Image (spheres, rainbow, N blue to C red):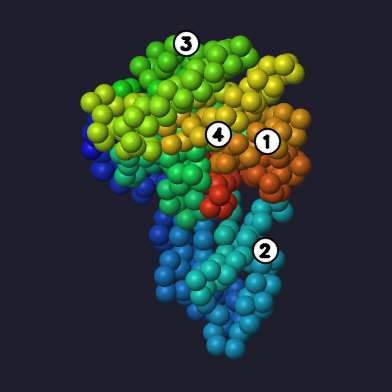
Amino acid sequence: MDGVAPPGDHLANAETVEVADRRRGFGRSGLERRYQELLDGFAEFGIRVRRAEQDACTEGPGFYVLRVVPDRGVSPDTVLARVPALKLKLGLASEQAIRANIDRGAIVFEVPKKDEDRYPVMAKELWARVEWPTNQLYAPLGEDVSGAVVGIDFSSAESPHLLVAGTTGSGKSVALEALLQGLARAYRPELLQFAMVDPKGTELVGFETDPHLLGDIGMFADDAIAILSDAVDEMDRRYSMFRQSRVRSLPDYNATAAQPLPWRVIVLDEYADLTADKEDRKVIEEKLQRLSQKARACGIHVIVATQKPSAAVLSTTIRSNLPAQLALRVRSAVDSRVIMDEAGAETLAGKGDAFFRTAKGIVRIQCAMLGS
Ligand SMILES: Nc1ncnc2c1ncn2[C@@H]1O[C@H](COP(=O)(O)OP(=O)(O)O)[C@@H](O)[C@H]1O
Ligand SMILES: [Mg+2]
């Protein structure tokens, strides 16, 4: 397990996870009761549906998912049209929406939980469930509506650089910290370096003494420019080393090299503050563009975070340079479109409820939090 700290070193042991799992959510019996209510509801309307054979009901931190199969001769439209009646029966609030879909031969209802039934996703428990890869830079972000782990693979062409955006209180800092701590726990400092800019000086303090940190945590636009320029130079240096060794990527290089090259993750928090000045903004955007074009193969990755996801702050170029997006709750559908090209993030519940979008598609997740 080269590159990954041994389990037990930093991960909760299996027993703790078991106990925690049983304590959280409404569990199997609560889930079955809700499933029965769903079936009863359809029976009352005389709509014949049966239990899906696979994953009939699954529970996640903020949602539960129920799957039914219409009997022969029952049109899926008849089933889908009952969403408002289900909403009433399950006692949901007006702003909570049931999403209905057709998937693998079943009709799927994603039902939001009441606040008191939601449970947090604890980062330590999540880390313990993950098989950390050694040849990719990967970290879990949270759980999807069914409770499955969702993570970001920075080494994949689908998600090399990440935008994290959401309004104040949406859970941006918590999500970012859990992501970065996950990386720090899994990859030794010889294999991973952080370069960080935190204009507020409060968000990333947890990393001040972290052995992964390159230099100091920056505060100003000049610091961001220095970090990005250095990364561009490092990228060019790495490519010439790759050419000499006739390899194409960091894992290939490290497989043969005596001295491994570390992954480098650059974090720019409060991007709006860093790019307030027009000249600075031009330089920062230009460097980001160079990095986004070819930094992935040499193991350099960028995370940009902002609480002001407006078109003025995030130009289309910058957005397209950050192919993965974690959209937490935002104020308006317009902001949501700036982040992830579609509306929806304005309807999120806050506190780590998020859409994670990559070239592969969008998943709704509950982001992990560190906790004690
Ligand atoms: N993933 C999460 N799980 C549970 N609660 C969360 C989560 N993320 C945020 N919260 C709650 O929301 C509050 C605000 O989160 P924070 O990350 O500071 O927001 P932001 O940085 O977007 O302003 C936190 O103090 C916490 O109580
Ligand atoms: Mg914050």
> Marks 3 and 4, Cα distance to the nearest angstrom?
23 Å
Distance in Å between CA atoms under marks 4 and 1: 10 Å
- Residue 132 visible in the picture: no
Extreme-bottom residue of the structure: 73
The reply to whether callout 3 and callout 4 are in contact (CB within 8 Å) is: no
Q: Which residue is mark 1?
A: 317
CA separation in Å, label 2 and label 4: 47 Å
Quadrant in the picture for residue 240: top left
Residue 22, percent across and down? 36, 49
Q: Is residue 32 left or right of residue 345?
A: left
Q: Is mark 2 within 8 Å of ligand 1?
A: no
For the residue pair 121 and 223, the one nearer the viewer reads as 223
In this rendering, would 113 be left or right of 92? left
Of helix, strand and loop, which one carries label 3? loop
Q: Earlier in the sequence, mark 3 or mark 2?
A: 2
Q: Total marks drawn?
A: 4
Q: Which residue is mark 2?
A: 88
Q: CA distance from mark 1 to mark 2?
A: 44 Å
Q: Choose the circle earlier in sequence order: 2 or 4.
A: 2
Residue placed most toward the observer, 129 or 27: 129
Q: Amino acid at mark 4?
A: Ser
Disc 4: which residue: 292
Task: List the residue tagged with mark 3.
Answer: 216
